[in-house]
Amino acid sequence: MSVHSTSPQFKDNAHAALHDVQLQRALSNVRVGFIEKRAKAAGKLPEFEALRDSARDIKDHVLAHLDLYLEAYIAKVEASGGIVHFARDAAEARAIVTDICREKGARTVTKGKSMISEEIGLNDHLAAAGIEPVETDLGEYIIQLRHETPSHIIAPAVHVNASQVEEDFRRAHTHLDAARDLSEPVNLLTEARGVLRERFLAADVGITGANFLVAETGTSIIVTNEGNGDLTQILPKTHVVLASIEKLVPTLEDASQLLRVLARSATGQELSVYTTFTTGPRRPEDPDGPESYHVVLIDNGRSSMLGTEFEEMLRCIRCGACMNHCPVYHAVGGHAYGWVYPGPMGAVLTPSLIGVDKGGHLPNASTFCGRCESVCPVRIPLPKLMRHWREREFERHLSPATVRSGIAAWAFFARRPALYRLATRVSMNLLAFAGRRKGGTKGRFAWLPFAGGWTEHRDFPAPQGGTFQERFARERAGRSGETGATAPASSRAA
C-alpha cells in the first residue's frame, strides 16, 4: 500500500458523508449531468454497443498476451530515443521518478492528472525530497490547495463548490489583489490559468499519466479538456510518463476504437478537447518538445490479478461511468471509499491492490442494481467481481460476526425446504399482522429486530401476508388450469 487507506472505516466515512450538507449538494451535479450527457452521446452513435464489444475484446486480447506487447512497446520507445523503467511496486516507482528529477536538477515539477501518481503517493514523496509538484489540471490543482485527494477519477474536485474554491484561491494566491472579484466561475478559471502559466514556464520536469500506450509505435496517449497535459509534456526539458502495465493496446487503430467509447462514457463528448499522441523525445526537426523522455511502467499488484477471477477488472479505461451511475456513490461521494479509486470500480480494484483485509468493506457498498455493468464501455461485470470479493471476505472470516451468523442461520433453513417454507410462512404472517395493526394493509415499521441498519434511515414496508413461494405456486396452478380449460379438443384427446 502506497498511501494511507481509510477503506476499513467505510461505514464511518459514509455516515459522515451522508450528514455533510455541502457534499450532498455537490453530488447532485453527478446525479444529473454525467448520466444525461452519456445517454445522449451513446444514443447518437448507432454502433456504440458494437464498439463496446470491440473494446472489451481488444483489452482481453492484450491481457492474454501482455508480456509480448510489453516487449514490443519497450522496443519501440527505445528505438525512438526514450527510456523505459519498470517498477514492481509503488516504492520503486517513486524512487525512479525522484532519481530522474534529481538527475535533471529539478526543483519544480508540473503534473497532468494521473490516478496512478495518486496510487503511488508521488506528490508527498517528491515534496519530501525537496521537489515541488504542481498539479495543472484545474480540479487537481484545487484539491492540492485543499490538501485533499480526488473524489472522482475524472472530476477530482466534484465535491467542492465555487465559494469554497474562492476561499482557497484567496488563501493561496496572496500575491494578487485582495479586492479582486472572484464571484463568477470564469474569474476563478482566469486566475488559475494565470497562476499556472508561470508554473508551466518554470518547470524542470513534466509528469503525465497515459490513457493508452500503443505497442505498435511506442506512443503514449492522453486525453484532456484543458490542454494542461500538452503544456506539461512540451515545455519542460524532461517528460516522464507514468502508466500501469494494463494501459497497453496493440495498434493505433485499436486505440482509436477505445477513444470512441472513452469520452462518450466519461463526459458525454464525442472526443475530449485534446487527444495528444507522444512518441519519444524531441527530434532535430521538431519545433518544441522535451529533450529526454522516460516511461515508468508500474505493476503494483496488477500482474497478480492476471489469470484470476479479477483479471476482467484490468480492462478498465478509467472513464468513471460506473460511479456516475452508482446510487451508492451518489449518496456518499468518493472520499468515503477511503483510497484512490471510488465507486464500483474502486470496490473491485482496491481490494485487489491493497488487500481484502483493508478494502473488504467496499464490495459490500453496492445495491447490485447492475447499472455500473450496463454502462461500462469495456463491459466489466462489476457486480460479479464484487460478489467474488464478498466470498473471499467471508472465507477469511473478515465479515462481521453478525453477518456470518445470519448467513449460517439462513443456510440451515435453506438446506431444509419444508422447515424453510414453514418458517417463512409464519414470519410473513406475523409481520403482516403487526403491519396491519400499525396502519392497515400498507403499514410500515420504523424499527425491527436485527434490521436496525435499514430502519435507522428508512421505514421497512410490512408484507401483505403469504410468501413468494406460496404466491408462485398459486399462480402456476392458475396458469395450468387456464391452459387445460382452453386447450383444443385434439390436444385433450391426445
Image: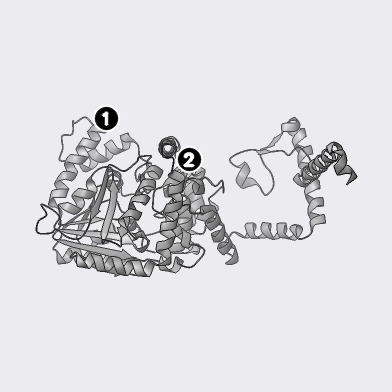
List x then y, in percent, for residue 123. 27, 57
Give the residue number, with chain letter if any, for mark 2. Answer: 19
The quarter of the image holding the N terminus is: bottom left
Which residue is drawn at the image coordinates 20% and 36% (left, top)? Answer: 190
The mark that comes first in sequence, 1 or 2, is 2
Which residue is drawn at the image coordinates 52% and 45% (left, top)? 371
What SS does tag 1 mark? Answer: loop
- Colouring: one colour
Amino acid tagged 2: His
Residue 338 locus on image (x, y percent): 43, 53
In the visual, does 350 lie left or right of 396? left
In this view, 183 is above or below 139: above
Residue 297 badge: none
Q: Report the residue marked by disc 1.
A: 184
Label 2 Cα crowd, 10 Å radius (few <14 / some 14-19 / many 20+): few
Nearest the eye: 484 or 452: 484
Give me the residue at 29% from left, 65% from top: 73
Q: Is residue 96 visible to us here?
A: no
